[in-house]
Image: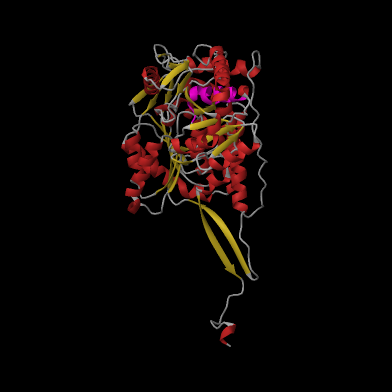
Amino acid sequence: MGKGFFQVPTAINEPVKTYVPGSPEREEVLKQYKAFYNDKVDVPLYIGSEEIKTGNTTPMSPPHDHKHIVGHYHLAEKEHVEKAISNCLEARDAWANLTWEQRAAIFLKAAELIAGPYRAKMNAATMIAQSKNIYQAEIDSACEIIDFLRFNVEYMSQIYGEQPESSEGIWNRVEYRPLEGFVYAITPFNFTAIAGNLPASAAMMGNVVVWKPSDSQVYSAKVIVDVFKEAGLPDGVINVVYGDPVMISDTVLSSPDFSGIHFTGSTDVFKSLWKQIGNNIHKYKTYPRIVGETGGKDFIIAHPTANPQQVATAITRGAFEFQGQKCSAASRVYLPKSTANEILDLVKTDVDSFNKPGSPEDMSNFITAVIHEGAFDKLAKYIDQAKADDDAEIIAGGNYDKSVGYFIEPTVILTTNPQYETMYTELFGPVVTVYIYEDSDWSETLKLVDSTSEYGLTGAVLSADRYAIDEATKALQNCAGNFYINDKPTGAVVGQQPFGGARGSGTNDKAGSMQNLLRWVSPRLIKETFVTPEDYRYPFLG
């Protein structure tokens, strides 16, 4: 960049619209929802300049009305994945050599398109594909993806501005090269924003990407592609394929030009991919970057001094928003004996106030459907097991029905066993398990929280006692990458609470921060000496 040191627009968090009854945004998204719902979309593979329709298709249905088909998407064969890789590599030089402000402009335009003309489309598609109520869709598929795009542009400019010191007669400078090859992005169903950010963050830094969205999120992923295309993203920078995940990953990870993976999904899958990368390491031209955010078994622990109403709200929101299908969702809760009954009564009151789980089109519904039949069956199994076990009981919810949609009632399990299966197993649904501890066992319970789960994603402590908060903050420092004090363990905001976790929850590269973008560059140090020495002798030689 030789024509100016450009200042990017200051990033600010996108305001969340309320969608109150009678508001224009509510009417607009309902109109778009109906249009999408009554249409049939045909989603191709996006490879280079081509939109490829293989003819081998899979139907897409809303989780809350699984007999209704809103479209089909085309499945890739191995040849298409190979073609996507080839197109990435063909596009790489031009994209990597494009001045950074031009790349920035594309993604800033994408953010503005989502904030404006695409907002209702993004939200409606997410409501249909992932069965999110309008508020959950708004904070995800509108606000969070806008924030990712805006803040990442700002972080990119800051990274490029980070330069070394120079001694007299020397000019040291660092350029932040994209990785040599292509990046593989695997994205989850639960957040449209994550689906957009994982390929976009790598591409923003000059990389080219093969993107495999979740099979359960293709409908809203298609809208992301539409946005990127309208924003001017060149062909071949992000190539999109759907289909057999094993075949796609095997093909990608066998390429010598594979240079990194950006992953959000299950812990087991991520470990398997890491092992596969290790087994193939001799094939690669460069050591691949491995970035992943995986599972969680996120906790809430309440101190005896905690306000019962505040604890109850943290449980209700933390466990049941988006049907608990957030990797940060509260899934295990530790309550003191002295206030447990009061807290649980308040939670029951909240659960009783919910409408019966239903469609997000009815905006009075707080709870909608879980993502697919596999998730439904898994959750139903654990609920039935809790009903049968002597050391567990259902104290709220516990019903389910998949005749129309995959509806699971918000369910609270009370256990007398701190090692009960649902205290450590990730369920990914609207089921939370509560264990009651003796007030005097606060310190021992902190150790229990730290040792019960393999994960280390999010957690929350609620207390009015600052000494207890300090003790918990220290005792739990390794079991949560995002730690919340007097709040629920969900709701991280880009630029404010960069997100990630360690242990079995991932590599903790903090999406929504500069740390993540640094993973997608390979710095090169350039030292220029202005007066070059001509004598090997140093002064000490005399």
In the picture provided, is 455 more to the left or to the right than 309?
left
Residue nearest the viewer, comparing 473 with 126: 473
Furthest-bottom residue in this view: 542
Q: Is residue 133 left or right of residue 239?
A: right
Name of the residue lying farthest toward the front: 440
Magenta-span inclusion, residue 317: yes
Q: Is residue 49 visible?
A: no
Name the main secondary structure of what is drawn in magenta: helix
Residue 374 locus on image (x, y percent) = 37, 23
User: Is residue 413 found inside the magenta-colored segment of the image?
Assistant: no
| Number of numbered discs | 0
Q: Provide residue 31's location: percent of width, then percent of height.
A: 57, 15
Q: Position of residue 521 (x, y in %)?
A: 51, 50
Rendered location of residue 504, percent (x, y): 43, 40
Chain part drawn in magenta: 310-326
Q: Would residue 240 be seen by someone viewing this image from the given angle?
A: yes
Coloration of the structure image: secondary structure
